[in-house]
Image (cartoon, rainbow, N blue to C red):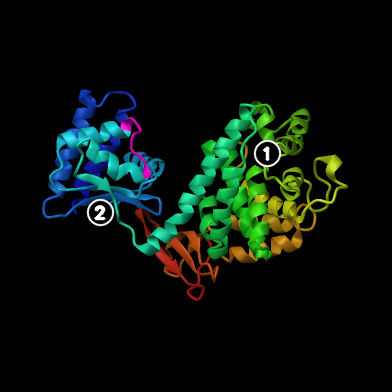
């Protein structure tokens, strides 16, 4: 397949969709992009049943051609597919300019989403663009974590939105998504965990809450919790920081060091969270303990001070490990993120005082020698990023090779599997 034509398709579709934020579909600027797009597709389609555009492990592709993650048009289309909850699009021979125009208009108006894709397009005269059916059964199984994680983000966003508006949030959807998260964690403990390392810096508050829930489940599984207890732990992780929503946003987002008075305000968020959670349905005492006690520390010298003498659930100690690990590995305005390796070392320094030593030991063992997010240098001198860890053997990892043996950064990362026996070392 001609790489230049592929690039023209991506630029044409991405540029036209982005332009719809400013102009109607009939605008000359959109029409120019549409004609470039149609011309490139017409050059690619002869002799083919279809041209597929979609995502592979978060990377945009057009048939066999992968696009680098820093390509602006590819970024636009990758985000669009994620928003639409679609695997991708199929472009078929016979495609017309009018079909493309209708398709773009529907995209711009947000009329297409998920399973309704194939039903809506024909109603608008679009017959040669369809929802892509490009994944094998195995690949569909691997995609489930992305859907569950995405749903968890939406659930937390809604809960936080309700809190900001002074409404009592519902816990029903949160309990449902946690049930799915638990089932995934039991069957593949690293699937959701890998997604928690793909940080969203622009939406830290609710992304952090989902990540803490995910990482808490990894901690709980490594400690041998039952499925029922894992559901409680996961729900507590989702809700642990709700109390921050009723603290001055300027304090929460302050880039520099907090004053003593500001930190005293921050320390109110566990108690604030309890007030909210007690008004919600289906919140038991263990969840309340997680919300109240995730900053109490293992030695119980943390905050809130008036909770230090209470008998707090051990699930709060597991959540504290998750909370600390996610905070350490996340870029904030006032700190650079630690690598997973350095974060594990730092967690070890906190064992026995801030963090529960036995729970931490189990969690670190489950991460394996090459935690997700680690960079490893292979024996042939290539450097790869760990993107997945084996369910049975944490030293069996999936990589994206990002630097070749000569030290040159690859325009398109290459997938690679590494077994424990092959070995690797961290750069």
Q: Which quadrant of the figure has residue 30?
A: top left
Which numbered disc, 2 or 1, marks the residue that appears first in the sequence?
2
Assign a secondary structure to mark 2. loop
Q: Is residue 99 left or right of residue 245?
A: left
Residue 367 pos. (x, y %): 59, 63
> Is residue 88 shown to the viewer in this render?
yes
Q: Residues within 10 Å of mark 1 (few under 14, many from 20)?
A: some
Q: Is residue 74 left or right of residue 298?
A: left
> Is residue 330 shown to the viewer in this render?
no
Residue 281 pos. (x, y %): 67, 41
Q: Is residue 407 left or right of residue 206?
A: left
Assign a secondary structure to mark 1. loop
Q: Where does label 1 land, which residue?
A: 280
Q: Nearer the viewer, residue 355 or 24?
A: 24
- Residue at (50% x, 76% y) in the render: 421
Q: Is residue 52 left or right of residue 166?
A: left
Q: Where does label 2 land, which residue?
A: 63
Q: Is residue 422 above or below residue 309?
A: below
Q: Residues within 10 Å of mark 2 (few under 14, many from 20)?
A: some
Q: Which quadrant of the figure has residue 417?
A: bottom left
Magenta-colored span: 108-114
Q: Nearer the viewer, residue 350 or 376?
A: 350
Tell me the quarter of the image containing the N terminus.
bottom left
- Residue at (66% x, 63% y) in the render: 226
Residue ranking furthest to the right: 309
């Amino acid at each position: 397949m001609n790489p230049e034509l592929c690039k023209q398709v991506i630029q044409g579709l991405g540029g036209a969709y982005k332009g719809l934020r400013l102009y109607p579909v009939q605008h000359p600027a959109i029409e120019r992009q549409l004609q470039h797009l149609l011309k490139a597709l017409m050059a690619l389609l002869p002799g083919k049943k279809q041209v597929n555009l979609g995502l592979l492990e978060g990377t945009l592709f057009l048939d066999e051609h992968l696009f680098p993650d820093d390509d602006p048009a590819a970024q636009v289309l990758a985000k669009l597919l994620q928003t639409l909850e679609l695997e991708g699009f199929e472009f078929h021979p016979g495609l017309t300019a009018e079909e493309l125009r209708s398709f773009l208009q529907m995209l711009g108006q947000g009329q297409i989403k998920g399973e309704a894709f194939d039903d809506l397009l024909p109603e608008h005269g679009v017959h040669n663009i369809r929802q892509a059916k490009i994944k094998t059964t195995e690949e569909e199984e691997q995609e489930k974590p992305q859907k569950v994680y995405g749903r968890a983000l939406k659930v937390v966003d809604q809960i936080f939105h309700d809190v900001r508006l002074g409404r009592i949030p519902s816990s029903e959807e949160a309990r449902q998504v946690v049930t799915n998260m638990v089932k995934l964690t039991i069957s593949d403990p690293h699937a959701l965990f890998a997604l928690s390392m793909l940080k969203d810096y622009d939406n830290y508050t609710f992304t952090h809450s989902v990540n803490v829930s995910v990482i808490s489940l990894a901690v709980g599984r490594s400690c041998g919790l039952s499925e029922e207890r894992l559901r409680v732990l996961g729900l507590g992780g989702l809700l642990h920081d709700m109390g921050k929503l009723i603290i001055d946003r300027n304090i929460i987002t302050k880039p520099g060091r907090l004053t003593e008075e500001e930190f005293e305000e921050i320390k109110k968020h566990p108690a604030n969270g309890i007030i909210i959670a007690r008004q919600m349905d289906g919140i038991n005492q263990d969840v309340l303990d997680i919300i109240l006690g995730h900053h109490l520390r293992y030695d119980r010298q943390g905050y809130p001070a008036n909770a230090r003498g209470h008998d707090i659930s051990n699930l709060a100690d597991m959540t504290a490990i998750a909370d600390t690990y996610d905070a350490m590995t996340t870029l904030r305005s006032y700190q650079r993120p630690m690598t997973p390796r350095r974060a594990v070392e730092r967690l070890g320094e906190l064992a026995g005082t801030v963090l529960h030593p036995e729970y931490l030991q189990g969690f670190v063992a489950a991460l394996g020698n090459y935690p997700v997010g680690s960079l490893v240098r292979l024996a042939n001198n290539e450097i790869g990023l760990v993107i997945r860890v084996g369910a049975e053997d944490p030293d069996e990892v999936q990589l994206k090779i990002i630097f070749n043996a000569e030290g040159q950064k690859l325009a398109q990362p290459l997938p690679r599997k590494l077994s424990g026996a092959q070995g690797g070392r961290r750069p």
